[in-house]
Amino acid sequence: MRNDISERRAETGESQADLAAAVGVTRQTINAIERERYDPSLELAFDLADHFGCRIEDLFDPDE
Amino acid sequence: MRNDISERRAETGESQADLAAAVGVTRQTINAIERERYDPSLELAFDLADHFGCRIEDLFDPDE
DNA sequence: CTTTACTGTAAAGCGAGCTTTACAATCGGT
DNA sequence: ACCGATTGTAAAGCTCGCTTTACAGTAAAG
């Protein structure tokens, strides 16, 4: 699923590892989501939106 | 994860089977989510929010 | 040139998300 | 009393989400 995570992360100057630690997953998980190898769980999507101070709908685009 | 699906469904007068068909899963999946046996995938959460014309954050509450 | 930080990737393994099939319980209408 | 619609539940099975461990590539910094 299309998402803006790497762009948001670039804005905050965080590494994949930084973000992973902040939301409680491994950096491989962040990498896989950014590269759209799979979608996050709903819970992780909430944690990511919370981290970036936005809504899930602002971070992810479900259109195919 | 806490959610309002059965309440929303009651308002629209849909059965679990109706909702399941509308969002493309089985009624067992809807039942399991309503009874909080597991969380939906992010994609299904989007479909449910779309079906009820609201946001994911309005339908699900991640607090514990 | 070596080191350090960051990123990409892979394999094995476990639990979560969802399916199909199937059976039981409740309830309202006829 | 029977019927149809609705809900709860269970087991087997498949794929996805995430972990751990590990190795390779790029790039900036000393």
Image: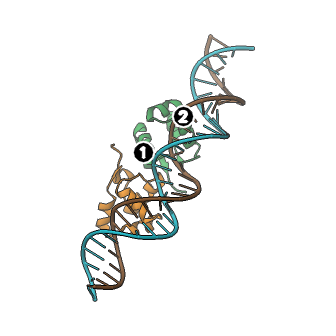
Chain colours: A orange, B green, C brown, D cyan
Examine the rendered structure and indicate whether residue B25 appears above or below residue A42: above
- Horizontal and vertical percent position of residue B45: 45, 45
Image quarter of residue D25: bottom left
Using the image, name the chain to which the residue with label 2 belongs. B
In this rendering, the answer to whether C17 lies above or below A31 is above
Q: Where is residue A19 in the image (x, y as percent from the top left)?
A: 40, 66
Residue type marked 2: Arg
Residue C16 is left or right of residue A14, and the answer is: right
Say which element carries label 1.
helix
> In the depicted view, which residue is nearer to us: B38 or B61?
B38
Q: How far apart are marks 2 and 1 (CA)?
A: 17 Å
Residue corresponding to mark 1: B43
Considering the numbered disc 2 on the image, is that residue within a helix, a strand or a loop? helix
Query: Which amino acid type is marked by label 1?
Result: Glu
Residue that numbered label 2 is attached to: B27
| Residue B54 visible in the picture | yes
Say whether residue B6 is visible. no
Q: Residue at point 29% right, 66% down? A: A10
Instruction: Identify which residue is drawn at 38% across, 56% down.
Output: A33
The structure residue drawn at horizontal position 41% and vertical position 52%, both measured from the top left corner, is: A38
Q: Where is residue B11 in the image (x, y as percent from the top left)?
A: 50, 34
Disc on the earlier residue, 2 or 1: 2
A38 left or right of C14 in image: left
Residue D8, quarter of picture = top right
- Judged left or right of residue C22, residue B61 is left
**Residue B60 locus on image (x, y percent):** 48, 48
Mark 1 nearby-residue class (10 Å; few <14, some 14–19, many ≥20): some
